[in-house]
Amino acid sequence: MNVEFINPFIKALLNVLTTMAQTTVTAGKPKLKNDAISKGDVSGIIGMIGPKIKGSFSISFDESLALTIMQRMLGERPDTLNEEVADMVGEITNMVTGGAKMELDEQGYEFDMATPAIVTGPNHTIVHQVSGPKLVITFTSPEGNVHLEICFDK
Amino acid sequence: MNVEFINPFIKALLNVLTTMAQTTVTAGKPKLKNDAISKGDVSGIIGMIGPKIKGSFSISFDESLALTIMQRMLGERPDTLNEEVADMVGEITNMVTGGAKMELDEQGYEFDMATPAIVTGPNHTIVHQVSGPKLVITFTSPEGNVHLEICFDK
């Protein structure tokens, strides 16, 4: 995997947050995960399998940002990270991976997506168990941060 | 998916814990997840994709049980849920899914496995976003509990 793999995911996330929730976040610099542990309060995780690649993708939101996105989408702000917020994070996970998949398919990196799992719990961390590089990028906003992690086994 | 899908996963978990860590856990009754929320301190999550099925699998350990398994495998008990414990949970996730995969392949339910992601954080919950049923089973032991969840989209 090369660092350019991350760009379709970045584009897809910016696009999804703008169109679905009128939310603009600012992308930081992509990093290799060795020195970067990203934490979040609610995360979507999805497996990816293709003939040439296999890996996992995660997207982790601060609670404050996840609740703001819900508010902008539905008009009401939930009190907590309830199951509706989890569903919304699952949808975003699907849409971002699906958007990146379309672009990577065109570049010859086909993969199929599993179904997402959503984790809720204050300040949890995620370790992707892959033999290849782990790329992480943090997006900041006044409402909180969101971290993307893209990991493939080669 | 029918409830028998869960049996290969149960067998594989019991087998892995016994052979790797001389640990016996007692299986509860498999339940549909609607009424059961399983919580854990460290979880392995893996995506599964086949021609006929697509889904995700998770295994969630109480901290005390995860540390006991590490102690029995390595002779030393870590103080916290560190990256080595996460790696061990990832390995168990791979082995249990791989064991179940072999058996389900023979029954005509082929699937390929993505790479596992491991989540660490006290008392987190997992929601699998699938359209099909979600099966959950809790195993108890004097050292703590472990929950399996198997979810497919049909």
Image (cartoon, coloured by chain):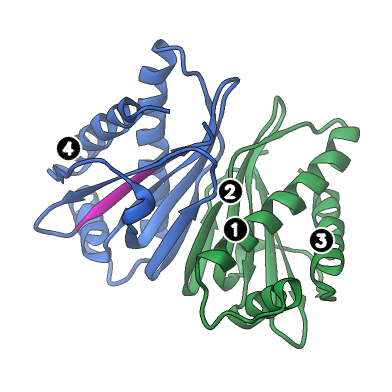
Chain colours: A green, B blue
> Looking at numbered disc 3 in the image, what kind of residue is underneath it?
Val
Amino acid type of the residue that numbered disc 1 sits on in the rendered structure: Gly
Q: Residues within 10 Å of mark 3 (few under 14, many from 20)?
A: some
Measure the alpha-carbon separation of dots 3 and 1.
Answer: 14 Å
Sequence-wise, the earlier of marks 3 and 1 is 3
Does residue A133 show up?
A: no
Percent from the top left, x then y, of residue A22?
A: 85, 74
Disc 3 vs disc 1: which is toward the camera? Answer: 3
Q: Chain of mark 3?
A: A
**Residue B58 visible in image:** yes
- Picture quadrant of residue B145: bottom left
**C-alpha gap between disc 2 and disc 1:** 6 Å
The residue where tag 1 is placed is A44
Q: Are marks 2 and 3 on the same chain?
A: yes
Report the span colored magenta.
Answer: B145-149
Q: Secondary structure at mark 1?
A: strand
Under circle 3, the secondary element is helix
